[in-house]
Image: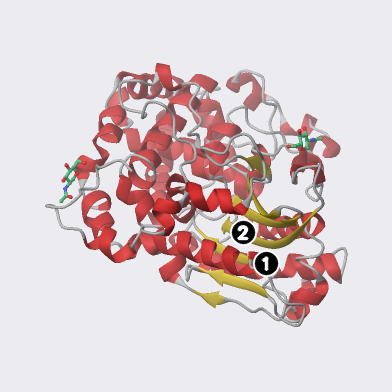
Amino acid sequence: MFPVSLPTNSFLVAALSLTLTRLSCSFLSVPEIPHIATYFGTKTRYEDVNPHLLRDGLSVNTSVLKPPPTERCSPVHLTAVVRHGSRYPTVKNIRRIQKLSELVRREASRGSEGSEGWLREVRSRWDMWYTEDMDGQLVSKGRDDLRQLARRLAVLFPSLLSDQNRRSGRIRFLTSSKHRCVSSVEAFQEGLQQHWGHHGETVDGTEEVEYRHEVDDELMRFFERCRGYVEGVEKNRSALMEVDAFKRGEEMEGVRRRMAERLDLPQHRLTPDLVEAAFFLCSYELSIKSLHSPWCFLFDESDAKVLEYKSDLKQYWKRSHGHAINGLSSCPLFHHVFRTLDKAGRPRRSTEASPEPASILVGHAETLLPLLSLLGLYKDPDPPTANNYQSQQGRTFRTSRIVPYAANLLFVLYDCQRGPRLQLLLNESPVRFPGLEKEDAPLYRDVRATYRHLLDGCNFHRECERGPGGRGPNTEL
Ligand SMILES: *[C@@H]1O[C@H](CO)[C@@H](O)[C@H](O)[C@H]1NC(C)=O
Ligand SMILES: *[C@@H]1O[C@H](CO)[C@@H](O)[C@H](O)[C@H]1NC(C)=O
């Protein structure tokens, strides 16, 4: 019943009236990618950020590790903060998809006889297959995301994610309690096992994996425990007023008008939520089933950019630089990471046990964005607002690039001749520390000096319990 694979570049009507029987099997086995796949915000696939993985999900570029070539260095510790892999929609979005699908079906059944429109095609080729019990769970593609990430990281860091370290339980695994994160940390461990032991198809070999991980919501879901954040931002409509204003603004109205025209529906029937539901539907069909869904044909690239901006606005004000408390709520995780790095970088006598080689922390986009913000990353000169869509086209704050499924922030500590050095990678590409842009892997003591104000402060209780009279959530760091 599902559309299998559709050409990307034709008009939708022409594309959909192509009889699928004309498509050869070999063509069907190579799913094409919607032209809007890089604009799905937090619903973007990892492969659409790193397209070389579409050809080979295990390919690794070892030159991303960049300690200074003039010094002898070896990696001594890896901390990876990882987002869960591809997942089903949550109940809220499943209900929206349901409403959209009912609307379209109702209208389709009234469509004039013999019309060859898009509605008829969706009606005959697409079924509402999402059910509420799927609620945000990891999909099998999401397990693959984490298995493959683990295997690539094992190639990048063979001495840290070694079989010996894995077997002896020296690699630390922490996860959020959410089902999709626990499944992800298990899949990561399966990936390491596949890398070191059972190569090839070991879908059934999963039983052999002895999972070792701890659940820690204080570290991985700090945002729901920070009262100042929950009350000042999450439950505070005026903290997100830019998002609401953009939703009603001319750019979003334009997307809605064009979608209504394509659907041949009166515009008032299509709420902004339903417009977004169709966009998400295109993303879910791709990330879950690798399908180029007919829903994707409702949007052109400029529509997708507007919808991406809408979701970036939301993440910016709700999880990132928009309010200082968003970043400060991640202080427990920030301190945890630096305590781990401190220990790993400390000089040791040869008799002492070697430090923890790696720490894998699995959470959410809502875990990563505040931490990245606290570190000062992806902060553009002007904040994105409802009114500056045009001037924000070159922004670095693009959630499609920063927090796709399986997004990962790597802290790599090297032992070098001049002392320990630290390198950051986001989604397996090097990222430089703000204020230390001259080097990929500055001396660890320089990184500590840069973040001195946070290392000495950033007290979760003080920041999170601050009353409205104190420093409010609007104060910039
Ligand atoms: C590998 O990574 C380096 C450093 O980020 C980059 O310059 C280079 O283009 C990458 N090579 C490939 C083939 O992607
Ligand atoms: C809600 O957000 C607005 C705008 O950011 C802010 O001025 C106000 O203090 C916040 N309210 C609470 C209760 O924190």
Please tell me whether mark 1 sits on a helix, a strand or a loop.
strand
Q: Looking at the image, which residue is at 40% across and 22% down?
A: 255
The image position of residue 426, as x and y in percent, is 61, 45
* Residue for badge 2: 80
Secondary structure beneath disc 2?
A: strand
Height in image: 428 above or below 267?
Answer: below
Q: Is residue 54 visible?
A: yes
In the depicted structure, whether residue 318 falls above or below residue 27 = below
> Which residue is rendered at x = 76% and y = 75% of the image?
165
Residue at mark 2: C-beta within 8 A of ligand 1: no
Choose the circle earlier in sequence order: 1 or 2. Answer: 2
Q: Residues within 10 Å of mark 1 (few under 14, many from 20)?
A: many
Mark 2 is on which residue type?
Ala
> Residue 206, position in %: x, y?
74, 74
In this picture, residue 28 sits left or right of residue 419: right
Where residue 324 sits: x, y (%)? 32, 46
- Residue placed most toward the observer, 473 or 40: 473
Question: Residue 447 vs residue 191: left or right?
Answer: left
Report the residue that reaches farthest toward the left.
469
* Image coordinates for residue 138, horizontal then vertical, percent: 57, 61
The answer to whether mark 1 and mark 2 are in CB contact below 8 A is: yes
Disc 2 residue crowd, few under 14, some 14–19, many 20+, Cα 10 Å: many
Judged from the image, the quadrant occupied by ligand 1 is top right
Residue behind mark 1 = 358
Amino acid found under the numbered disc labelled 1: Ala
